[in-house]
Image: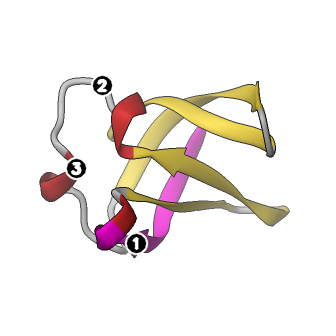
Amino acid sequence: MQGIIKKILADKKCGFISQEGVEKDVFFSGAKLDGISFEDLKEGDAVTFEVEAGDRGPAAVGVKKA
């Protein structure tokens, strides 16, 4: 899937990814990045990812810059 980093919560090393045509944003954890560090991400960056069921709902995994 593709999306845009909408919000970064630097203190918690996580954030949210928005997708065109999808109302709800997807949560991502800095621990689930692929080939990039959390510090390399900025709000507005295009990313690719997969979605898995997490404890609190769907979560992005394998997040990398597009």
Q: Specify few, some or many for label 3: CA neighbours under 10 Å numbering under 14, 14-19, or 20 or more.
A: some
Between the C-alphas of marks 1 and 3, the distance is: 10 Å
Between the C-alphas of marks 1 and 2, the distance is: 18 Å
Where disc 1 sits, the SS reads: strand
Amino acid, disc 1: Leu
Judged by its main secondary structure, the magenta piece is strand
x, y percent for residue 55:
78, 35
Q: Residue at the spot x=35%, y=44% of the render?
A: 30
Q: Specify few, some or many for label 1: CA neighbours under 10 Å numbering under 14, 14-19, or 20 or more.
A: few
Q: Specify few, some or many for label 2: CA neighbours under 10 Å numbering under 14, 14-19, or 20 or more.
A: some
Q: Nearer the viewer, mark 1 or mark 2?
A: 1
Residue at mark 3:
38
Q: Residue at the spot x=39%, y=71% of the render?
A: 8
11 versus 34 height, above or below: below
Q: Quadrant of the N terminus?
A: top right
Q: Is residue 48 left or right of residue 37?
A: right
x, y percent for residue 2:
55, 43
Quarter occupied by residue 36: top left
Q: Quadrant of the C terminus?
A: top left
* Tag of residue 34: 2
